[in-house]
Amino acid sequence: MPKVLIADKLSPAAVSIFKVRGVEVDVKTGLPKEELLKIVDQYDGIAIRSATKITKDVIAAAKKLKVVGRAGIGVDNVDIPAATAAGVIVMNTPFGNSITTAEHAISLMMALAREIPAANASTHAGKWEKNRFMGVELYGKTLGLIGCGNIGGIVADRAKGLKMHVIAYDPYLSAERAAELGVEKAELDDLLSRADFISLHTPKTAETKNIISAAAIAKMKKGARLINCARGGLVDEVALKAALDSGHLAGAAVDVFETEPAKESVLFGNEKVVCTPHLGASTEEAQENVALQVAEQISDYLITGAIVNALNMPSITAQEAQLVKPWISLAEKLGAFAGQLTENEILAVEILYEGTAATLNQRALTQAALAGLLKSHLPDVNMVNAPVVAKERGIKVSETRQDQRGIYEGYIQVKVTTPDMTRGIAGTVFSDGHPRLIQVKDIKLDAEFAPNMIYVTNEDKPGFIGRLGTMLGESKVNIANFTLGRSAPGEDSIALVQVDGDPGDDVIAAIRKLPLVRGAKALKF
Ligand SMILES: NC(=O)C1=CN([C@@H]2O[C@H](COP(=O)(O)OP(=O)(O)OC[C@H]3O[C@@H](n4cnc5c(N)ncnc54)[C@H](O)[C@@H]3O)[C@@H](O)[C@H]2O)C=CC1
Ligand SMILES: O=C(O)C(=O)COP(=O)(O)O
């Protein structure tokens, strides 16, 4: 039974889902890192929110880990490259808390406009300072959104309801989507100079880090107000404090901080700053949504292989997972076959999907083929990190799909180009679900994949098979199966010999010395 750790506070709904789905679950929240490192090797999955940091060393210690599920959106607390390199899938729940977070941004904007937190504190203190607090209307004001994806889009919709004019800076926002939302697209500097309120809704990336820098703040309208309900680190907190102190900005609302938990901050103690402790997603509804979703996604992956909302793998439904599994195994074995025959730098990989194979999840199949191919030389490669590794090595990967043309209902061909040759290996999946090899280079054959095989290329002349059989027998290598293929009588020929156990280097060297033999290799699957 797979075992999952819930490492951050999640709605109890998650525990029920795991149990119902047949996943053992431990709830250990707020663990210091040293404690997490000690126990993490027991788990196949970890469910987190923003508190637990899934760092490189946590991934390295988590020997069984297959999936990290983020009950929420931002995954900047997960080292995704390290997870990918280790073959760990990272999933989030991209919509479960968006409405709630958008509502928090709108609440913060209203709180800023009417100084509600300070007025509340003053009134509770019995001061009745009616003349001290003078707000501004939102009606007719310009709201500038930096980032207009799921949350930004909802904020825009709600702000339109408040009769605000909404402008957005988001290089990836299409003109159609902007029109649909009734939002005016703007360049960053234009937005900074025009907006009365600016609300941030981007992830934290290399481009968005410190997007509200001292220079950006200087471009903002005097008296403007800033809301950050996205990520700490998008705003230069020191520059923000200076702008509030100088009176350039009228107020700021901050839900997220550069360092969290934020027990101290340059922004604390300033009446112009409205703070909340990363509460953007904290409603009963959102927490129920994200907990249910993450528990379902993690369980589905661990039990059926279905992948949803992964940031480092294509999605695969449970039904698809069932259908695609034997083809993934085939793609991986074809890649492994080609990889074991390749002793040179790989320049390009072309993968052809025909018939049934062309109807399946191509990204998953290609990742499996690449993993098989690269693994023979780079043992740490897996299906998750294979595309990254291929890209790092400058390997050109291309895919083609075509309808059934030949006798097989479907097949996959993996063609590998090195500086001196291009070699294609093809295979199919029979109705029994077993992958079969059907072509090596241009030679047709029909062979099963076995854990230990000997691949021999030779001249198609009488006497070779007998000599090979005798030699293997004398070397105490038991032949389980023997497949032959040739391009034409008397020409290039291939022998694929299934053997019981590793034949060993000496036997392979002896085969290479047999008459008519061009090459021999031990293969493992
Ligand atoms: N305070 C809280 O508790 C919560 C915070 N969040 C944060 O809110 C952020 C936004 O969430 P969603 O809207 O769901 O994400 P999303 O992915 O739907 O939208 C992000 C938008 O930012 C845009 N973007 C990316 N790079 C940009 C750049 N350099 N300049 C301008 N725009 C850029 C993207 O095109 C996209 O439209 C999340 O990344 C997360 O960090 C999310 C939920 C709760
Ligand atoms: O979903 C997100 O990105 C959030 O920031 C919410 O964080 P939380 O789950 O409340 O720690």
Image (tube, grey):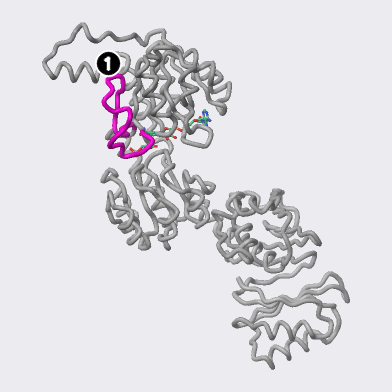
Q: Quadrant of the N terminus?
A: bottom left
Looking at the image, residue 476 lies above or below residue 440? below
Q: Which residue: 31% across, 22% down? A: 273
Range shown magenta: 257-280
Q: x, y percentage for residue 270? A: 28, 23
Looking at the image, residue 515 lies above or below residue 391? below
Mark yes or no: residue 354 visible: no
Looking at the image, residue 476 lies above or below residue 37? below
Q: Is residue 269 magenta?
A: yes
Mark yes or no: residue 455 visible: yes
Residue 276 picture quarter: top left
The residue at the far bottom in this view is 474
Given residues 37 and 512, the one toward you in this image is 37
Q: Quadrant of the C terminus?
A: bottom right
Given residues 387 and 485, the one toward you in this image is 387
Q: Which residue: 39% across, 59% down? A: 44
Q: x, y percentage for residue 399? A: 69, 49
Q: Which residue is mark 1?
A: 115
Principal SS element in the magenta part?
loop
Q: Is residue 525 magenta?
A: no
Q: x, y percentage for residue 373? A: 65, 61
The residue at the far right in this view is 490
Given residues 119 and 143, the one toward you in this image is 119
Residue 158 picture quarter: top left
Secondary structure at numbered mark 1: loop
Label 1 CA crowd tier, 10 Å (few <14, some 14–19, many 20+): many
Residue 61 picture quarter: bottom left
Horizontally, is 296 left or right of 372 in the view? left
Q: Which residue: 50% across, 14% down? A: 193
Q: Quadrant of ligand 2?
A: top left
Q: x, y percentage for residue 455? A: 72, 75
